[in-house]
Each structure stands twice: as structure tokens, then as C-alpha cells.
């Protein structure tokens, strides 16, 4: 009987430590990436009048194709560093009835690098 109590209590202690191990400070937490990776270079290649096929070649398949807005493609990307604040970027591309790109909106701007957008000046060569 004494052996059973000792075995049971040591098993419970090990289970408790295993469960609590995930919440100890300093435990490595992975970065979580989701969605389409979109770069400024990809945005700079887009031009009004491009076909859906050309846009798909540059950007890849959209993350969201809305059945109610068939002429809009949405690309979303989110990154949450291990235990940190979640960051999200998005861009929406609009096509006309002839399947040609007519507009884009979101966190990226064509021809504007991230440094230029933040600093307000062109980066120095």
C-alpha cells in the first residue's frame, strides 16, 4: 500500500511538472507565420491592366477569394514572434469585368519602399 501511494504521488508530480513546463519563463516559443508572403518587389511589378494570370504569376494564389466579390483578391500575411505582438499586413487587388487589374489597396504602396514610407525620404545609395 505504501509503495502504491509513493508511486502514485511521484506520477502526479511528474505529470504536474510536464504540464507546468510550458508556462515557465524562458521557454522557447516558436514564431507563427500565416498567409501569403508579400514583398515590396512583388508589389512594384504589378501594373494596371495586367491579367489575373499575370498577377497570379507574380503574387501567387490569393489567400481569400470572396464569392460575393469575385473581382477582388485579398492577400494576408501575419507574423507573431514567439510570445510577442501579432503583426499583420494585407493587400487587396481589384479586377474589372475583362479580368484586368484596376486598383490595389492595403498596407503596401507601389514604388514606395518601406524605408521611404517610414522616413519620408528616398533611401541613399
Image (cartoon, rainbow, N blue to C red):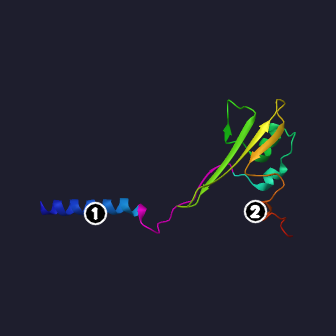
Check the image and report above or below for 49 versus 6: above
- Left or right of 33? Residue 97 is right
Asked if residue 86 is positioned above or below residue 47 in the image, the reply reads below
Q: Residues within 10 Å of mark 1 (few under 14, many from 20)?
A: few
Up-down: is 48 above or below 96?
Answer: below
Image spot of residue 96 (x, y percent): 82, 33
In this picture, residue 73 sits left or right of residue 8: right
Is residue 20 rendered magenta in the image?
no
Q: Residue at x 50, y 65 (%)?
A: 28
Q: Position of residue 75 (x, y in %)?
A: 70, 45
Q: Is residue 80 left or right of residue 91?
A: left
Residue toward you, 41 or 9 = 41
Q: Residues within 10 Å of mark 2 (few under 14, many from 20)?
A: few
Q: Quadrant of the C terminus?
A: bottom right
Q: Nearer the viewer, residue 54 or 64?
A: 64
Q: Range of the magenta residues?
A: 22-36
Q: State the quadrant of the N terminus.
A: bottom left
Residue 30 in the image: x percent, y percent?
54, 60
Task: Specify the label residue 125 is tagged with.
Answer: none
Q: Quadrant of residue 87?
A: bottom right
Rendered residue at 74%/36% (across/down) = 72
Q: Residue 18's image quarter?
A: bottom left
| Residue position marked by numbered label 2 in the rendering | 118
What is the quadrant of residue 39 in the picture?
A: bottom right
Q: Do the residues bearing badges 1 and 2 touch, measured as CB atoms within 8 Å?
A: no
Q: CA distance from mark 1 to mark 2?
A: 52 Å
Identified at 80% across, 59% down, the residue is 113
The overriding secondary structure of the stretch rendered in magenta is loop
Instruction: Report the disc number at residue 13.
Output: 1
* Kind of element beneath mark 1: helix
Amino acid at each position: 500500500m505504501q509503495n502504491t501511494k509513493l508511486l502514485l504521488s511521484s506520477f502526479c508530480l511528474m505529470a504536474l511538472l510536464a504540464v507546468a513546463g510550458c508556462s515557465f519563463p524562458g521557454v522557447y516559443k516558436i514564431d507563427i507565420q500565416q498567409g501569403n508572403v508579400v514583398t515590396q518587389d512583388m508589389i512594384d511589378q504589378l501594373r494596371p491592366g495586367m491579367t489575373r494570370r499575370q498577377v497570379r504569376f507574380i503574387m501567387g494564389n490569393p489567400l481569400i477569394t470572396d464569392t460575393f466579390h469575385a473581382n477582388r483578391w485579398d492577400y494576408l500575411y501575419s507574423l507573431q514572434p514567439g510570445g510577442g505582438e501579432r503583426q499583420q499586413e494585407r493587400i487587396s487587388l481589384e479586377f474589372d469585368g475583362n479580368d484586368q487589374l484596376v486598383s490595389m489597396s492595403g498596407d503596401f504602396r507601389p514604388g514606395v519602399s518601406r524605408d521611404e514610407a517610414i522616413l519620408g525620404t528616398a533611401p541613399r545609395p
